[in-house]
Amino acid sequence: MTTVLVGLDSVDWTRLRTSDPRRDARDVPRLLRNLEAAADPGPFAWSGELAGLVVHDHSGCLVQSAEFVIPFLIALCAAERAGVAPAAVSLLIDLTAEPFITEIEAGNTDMRARTWAAILAGRESYYALLGSAEPGARADALELLSILEHGSPRFQRAMADLEKAEDHSLVLERIRDLAAHPGLDRRTPEPPD
């Protein structure tokens, strides 16, 4: 199998903090590979386990390893296996959150700006997902794009075009929700300056 996870083994995962202070991030490559393979029990199970390492459980805030996961999640947005792209985009939505206090205390004060820049770098992948055969991928890509650039003319055109062509209730409901609550979704704070 050809992998889109190029460079995964070049990251020193053992040095990176996770949401569990007793664990380093050495499980991240295995979880990303299982997500890519859509291995049993399925992509959302693997992205959920991955979220458990990179997003603080109680606060929903990011830990250090989160920013190193982003490029691989963006690469997985192009995956052809069912469920992989929606699972990756769903986790990217979660990664637009604030860093956890331990990151600030550790001097990682510009982490939020770096994570947003990394997520924004995948913008073309998210627009491409608006044409996905998977309704979950279309709906989550639309939500992520709304968080990143709701006011942009390109996003507004893309949402209007999708609404005209869409026939799946999940996506139509997401379009209505985003139109009623423009900008950021309710889980996400304001983007960094």
Image (cartoon, rainbow, N blue to C red):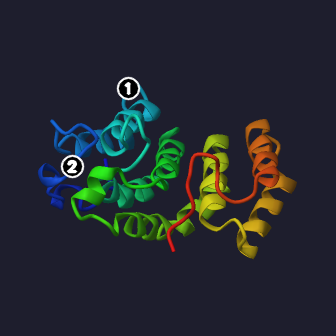
Q: Position of residue 174 (x, y in %)?
A: 74, 45
To which residue does mark 2 refer? 17
- Which residue is pictured at 38% across the width and 26% down the height? 40
In the rendered structure, which amino acid carries the disc numbered 2? Arg
Looking at the image, is 72 positioned above or below residue 118?
above
How would you rate the neighbour count of disc 2 (Cα within 10 Å): few for under 14, some for 14-19, many for 20 or more?
many
Could one spot residue 167 in this view of the protein? yes
Answer with the quarter of the image where residue 8 lies: bottom left
- Which residue is pictured at 59% across the width and 64% down the height? 148
Say left or right for 137 vs 5: right
Q: Which mark is residue 101?
A: none
**Numbered disc 2: secondary structure:** loop
Looking at the image, how many numbered discs can be counted on the residues?
A: 2
Q: Position of residue 23 (x, y in %)?
A: 17, 38
To which residue does mark 1 refer? 40
Say left or right for 145 vs 30: right
**Numbered disc 1: secondary structure:** loop
Say left or right for 151 vs 94: right
* Distance Cα–Cα, label 1 vs label 2: 27 Å
In the rendered structure, which amino acid carries the disc numbered 1? Asp
Q: Earlier in the sequence, mark 1 or mark 2?
A: 2
